[in-house]
Structure formats: C-alpha cells, structure tokens
Image (spheres, rainbow, N blue to C red):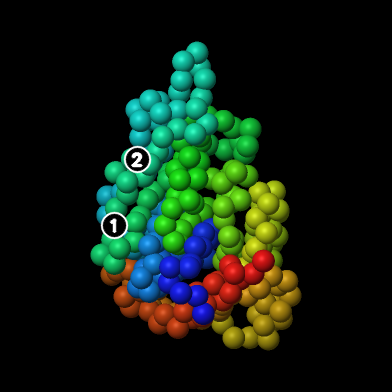
Amino acid sequence: MLERWELVLKVAISGKGGVGKTTLAAILAYLFARDGYSVTAIDCDSSINLPSALGVKDVKPLSELREIIEQRVKGPFGIFRYNPKVDDVFENYSAINDFGVRVLVLGTIKKGGEGCFCPENAFLRAILRHAIFRDDVLILDMEAGIEHLGRGTAKGVDVLIAVVEPGTRAIETLGRIEKLAADLEIKKIGVVVNKYIDSPKVAELIGSISHPILGIIPYNQCFIQADLENLPPYRLCDLKPFEEIKKNLLRLGKQK
C-alpha cells in the first residue's frame, strides 16, 4: 500500500458530453483531498462545470487573460515564447475549495492540433505543463477530445480515463479516445462505465472492452438531485463506486 507522500498521479478524464466526466473528476478530487493529498483539478471543457461540482464560484477562464497572454507569450518581431512564465498566473487565478482542492478553468483552446501555435494555445499548454510538475494529484476534466494536451504535455499524464455510457456509441467514443491517446503517446487507458443498468446486452458490451475497467457507476437519480440543488455530488451520492475506481486507478497508475 502506498504511503501518502509516495503518490504522484496525473489523470486526464475524457468522454463525450453528458457522460459524467465532471462528476467523476469532482468526486476523485474530493476523495484524494480527503485522504490528505495535494490536489489540483483543472476544467479543460468549454462548458465549464467543474468549479460548481467542487463548490467553487467565479473562477476566471485563463484563456480570457488576453493582456497577460500578450505580455507573456509574444516577443519582439512577432516571436512567440514557447515556455512563458505562468507560475504566478496559476496561483493568482485559481481558487481553493472548502476541502483544499485547487481549481482552475483553462477555457477554450483554438483548434488545429500541434500546428496551431497561437499565443492562447502556448499559454494554456504552459499552464498544463506547470500543473503536471507540481502537487501530488492532478485531475484534468477534458472535452470529448483532448486537444488541450500537446505531445510534450501528454507525456506527463499517467492515465487517461475514458468515461462511457452503456450502448453501442460507447465503443465508438472509446475508439476515438484510443486514437487521440495513441497520437499523444499516452500509454495507459482505463474505462469507467457510468449510468449502468443491469442487462445481458450491457454486460456483453462491457465484456467487449479491451482496456481495464476501473469501475462501474450505477444509474442514480442523486446526481440529478445534486445538480438541481447546486450541491457538489459527493455531498449527496453514494461514493462506494468511486472508492473502487480510485483504488483501481492507483493500481493502474503504478503499473510499468
């Protein structure tokens, strides 16, 4: 069993919209922080739901810091700085929730993959690089794609979690995530099945997934109730499935 100070774990969570990525990210952040780890949670999804799921309000998206981006990234004669100074930005534009998780919102990244070297992309990826090399646990709540991660940043990610719902589209979504992970050289993929309803067809579908199943979260109205009451989901919902996911995530993260 790992001692607390031995754990360094960087996790990116991806999946199509509405599958429960943010709920998983928030509850994992809560569980690790509860156990005494230093945790940073970053919302990389343009819909920006992670702060409210962690009980935090008014976190400014870093992509909107236009003056700072101009100052830090643009050099003379149109030159861009690939590694702008961001440590103070990281500190000043994050929030700490009531159990100690540092929360940041990245904001929208411009599309174009590795070839799109615009000031905003350089700045946001510098923030991610800084985040990856600090704190015990980093949790990234990604969009359906993982465009925020360039190859250099992705090398610091220990595990990519694909969140899927039961259904044939889950396999299609997982296939897209696998391709993105391969492009970014992320080696470890774990799968979380959310909104699970017991049936032979669903069991067959889950059995066809080749990656490790980190956990299965049963369909539960409490997540809807938490949203309606504007409460973090870990305040209302059963955390046992998430405890199992956390345990399996640690096991996968330790594998060579």
Q: Is residue 173 left or right of residue 121?
A: right
Name the spot of residue 66 as percent of width and height, x first.
37, 30
Q: Which quadrant of the view contains residue 56?
A: bottom left
User: Which residue corresponds to mark 1?
Assistant: 96
Q: What residue type is disc 2 on?
A: Val
Is 2 above or below relative to 157?
Answer: below
Packing grade of label 2 (10 A; few <14, some 14-19, many >=20) is few
Q: Which mark is residue 56?
A: none
The residues tagged by marks 1 and 2 sit, at their Cα atoms, a distance apart of 14 Å
Q: Is residue 48 left or right of residue 172?
A: left
User: Which residue corresponds to mark 2?
Assistant: 89
Looking at this rendering, what residue extends furthest in the top direction? 77
Nearest the eye: 41 or 131 = 131
Name the spot of residue 141 as percent of width and height, x first.
48, 57
Is 177 above or below relative to 205?
Answer: above
Q: Residue at x 46, y 74 (%)?
A: 3
